[in-house]
Image: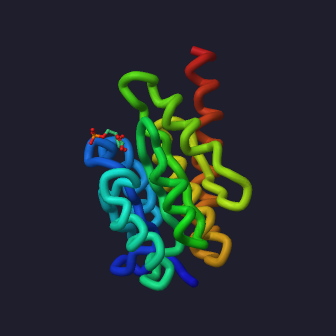
Amino acid sequence: MKAGNADKPLVGILMGSDSDWPTMKAAAEVLAEFGIASEARVISAHRTPQDLEDYASGALERGLRVIIAGAGGAAHLPGVTAAFTIMPVIGVPIESKSLKGLDSLLSIVQMPPGVPVATVGIGAAKNAGLLAVQILGVGDERLQKRLAEFKQQLAEESRAKNQTLAG
Ligand code: RP5
């Protein structure tokens, strides 16, 4: 499987509400930077559970390869998504008003044995997108090259911070 066909989404980005999009759009943006098409949907484990079953159970057959799911509070969206698919699911805990996302983090990360969700930090949708790129990159030399360049750039930016200190 090769990534890079801009017309065919390989990654599904789910969120429990449109209020999650300001956070979740960072995943779509980083995927686009790597030339990976994604699709975004508001689907809720609690408000539209039947839609979630339909989406997750048919996702692999439709051509998706990774699902990123962000939710806040009692954040069951990533876990229930993982229950309905064999593809990798990456969970993004959304920062909640009352508990600052700790509720979201614990809801997403504490999955029972047998149903893993790869959980990134609170609000860390960019990392979720990057992890999706890395998963897709396992079977794609073009993406591997891009990821190596990305890491090189990170290292250069980190080293450059020494110049600021020296000044
Ligand atoms: C969760 O409840 C959503 O993922 C969102 O983070 C949170 C609040 O939803 P809204 O009240 O903004 O629709 O299900």
Residue 21, x across and y down, in percent:
31, 47
Residue 3, x across and y down, in percent:
51, 77
Number of marks in the rendered image: 0
- 24 in relation to 149, above or below: above
Quadrant of the rendered image containing residue 156: top right
Furthest residue toward right: 113
Quadrant of the rendered image containing residue 105: top right
Question: Is the image coloured rainbow, by chain, by secondary structure, or in one colour?
Answer: rainbow
> On the picture, is 140 further left or further right than 92?
right
- For the C terminus, the image quarter is top right
Quadrant of the rendered image containing residue 94: top left
- 83 in relation to 17, above or below: below
Residue in view at x 47 percent, y 85 percent? 61
Residue in view at x 51 percent, y 58 percent? 80
Residue 141, x across and y down, in percent:
64, 76
Q: Nearer the viewer, residue 90 or 113?
A: 113
> On the picture, is 9 further left or further right than 103?
left
Residue in view at x 40 percent, y 54 percent? 45
Whether residue 74 is visible, yes or no, is: yes
Whether residue 145 is visible, yes or no, is: no
- For the N terminus, the image quarter is bottom right
Q: Nearer the viewer, residue 130 or 110?
A: 110
Specify the quarter for ligand 1: top left
Residue 85, x across and y down, in percent:
55, 71
Residue in view at x 59 percent, y 65 percent? 88
